[in-house]
Amino acid sequence: MSIIQCFKLALKSIWSSKVRSLLTMLGIIIGVSAVIVIIGLGNGMELYMTDQFASMGTTTLNVTIMGRGSSRQASVDDIYQIASDNPTLIKAVTPTVSGQGGIKVGRDSYHGTSVTGVGEDYLAIKQYTLAQGRGIQYSDILGRQNVCLIGSYISQECFNDNPLGKTLRIAGSPYTIVGVLNEISDSTQYSSDDLVLLPYSSAARLFRVGTPSSYTFDAVDKDHVTAAKAAVEDALFEIFGDDDAYSVFAMSELLDAMTDMLNIMITILAAIAAISLVVGGIGIMNIMLVSVSERTREIGIRKSLGARKWDILSQFVIEAGTTSAIGGVLGIGFGYLLSSIATTMIEVMLQESLTVTPTADSIALAFGVSVAIGVAFGYLPARKAANLNPIDALHFS
């Protein structure tokens, strides 16, 4: 008997007992859909994290100078020289100076506003863009000018989107607004847009910190982050002679660590979900044993007419595989439906754009495992059918 004939017989048998077959497939359907949704959720979370880290800069290196146990100091010029000495690895660097000052506009005070001193390349490194005015310039830094950039929240809240040339006070000192940043975060979340940027030299004077101790380097691309980090660490070690005097941290390292943890968690959850595939396989084996019992006389007739063991074995194995394959196809469709529902629920409930995205690999894996389980669990009933004695089978009623 050909495989095509076996397949046709399998479809006929499944169709003749639709409800029983559907219940048999249920474990496979649930298992396949669960695996697809879980892996899709993992992919969506990975893309979401990548997008979030991209906004913070996956090519950036954050350097902190502690100077522990070292009498040597690294000036701003020393740090800029590191970038100049490695043009193929580093494209920009900026000092950052933060402090607690609070801002005052007219008679209104704002204590939650972030105030940071930065260099002229800060906007490019952070991928911020200007809505109005200009950015921090080298002349502002050199002359310690009392100028500033403000976030879109302050522009809307305090100046009705018309802030250029106006002043605000930080720790009692007046600063002229020369630029406004485009919105950074979601319109319902103002934390990232509630900020003021000053020339780092002005901020160092304002907060009385002396030489800046925090710097942000920007590697030329993601492929050169590791090499750029090594170059910065080597240069700082040459200055201090002590690797405890500084720390260099790459944002991409944090992203990689979080991605690895997420992949482990998703793999464990997918493995747990796959248990239902095994349960589905047991259901297939059970129903195939029942089918063999019901069709014992048919098997005896076929054997008496010359059917070989292989013919009987292949018939029942293909029937089991077909049952699990149909269950797998239904599970794929159900998985896509659940993925769409999950995406909508996440957007509505969490107000976050996270798309549950099943991949072709996860679908192929879930489907392939479902068919393999069907064939594996269908083999024992098929072997039992193939080994039936034709005389005993013909006498079965």
Image: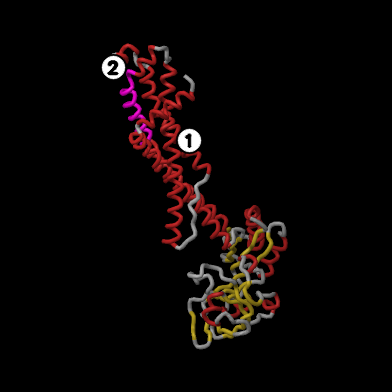
Point out which mark residue 183 bears: none
Tell me what residue is drawn at x 56 percent, y 55 percent: 253
Residue found farthest to the bottom: 107
Residue 21 image point, x, y percent: 36, 34
Label 1 Cα neighbours within 10 Å, binned few <14 / some 14-19 / many ≥20: some
Which range of residues does the magenta coloring cover?
279-297
Residue 53 versus residue 133 in the image, above or below: above
**Main secondary structure found in the magenta portion:** helix
Q: Helix, strand or loop at disc 1?
A: helix
Q: Quadrant of residue 307?
A: top left
Query: Mark 1 highlights which residue?
Result: 368
Tell me what residue is drawn at x 59 percent, y 61 percent: 57
Q: Is residue 189 magenta?
A: no
Label 2 Cα neighbours within 10 Å, binned few <14 / some 14-19 / many ≥20: some
Residue 265 visible somewhere in the drawing: no
288 vs 214, nearest the viewer: 288
Q: Tell me which amino acid carries mark 1.
A: Gly
> Which colour style is shown?
secondary structure
214 vs 318, nearest the viewer: 318
Q: Helix, strand or loop at disc 2?
A: loop
CA–CA distance between discs 2 and 1?
37 Å
Q: Which marked residue is nearer to the observer: mark 2 or mark 1?
A: 2
Q: Would residue 154 appear left or right of 137 to someone viewing this image?
A: left
Tell me what residue is drawn at x 38 percent, y 31 percent: 14
93 vs 78, nearest the viewer: 93
Residue 256 image point, x, y percent: 54, 52
309 vs 8, nearest the viewer: 8
Q: Tell me which amino acid carries mark 2.
A: Phe
Point out which mark residue 396 bears: 2
Q: Would residue 273 appear left or right of 132 to someone viewing this image?
A: left
Residue 82 image point, x, y percent: 69, 63
Q: Mark 2 or mark 1: which comes first in sequence?
A: 1
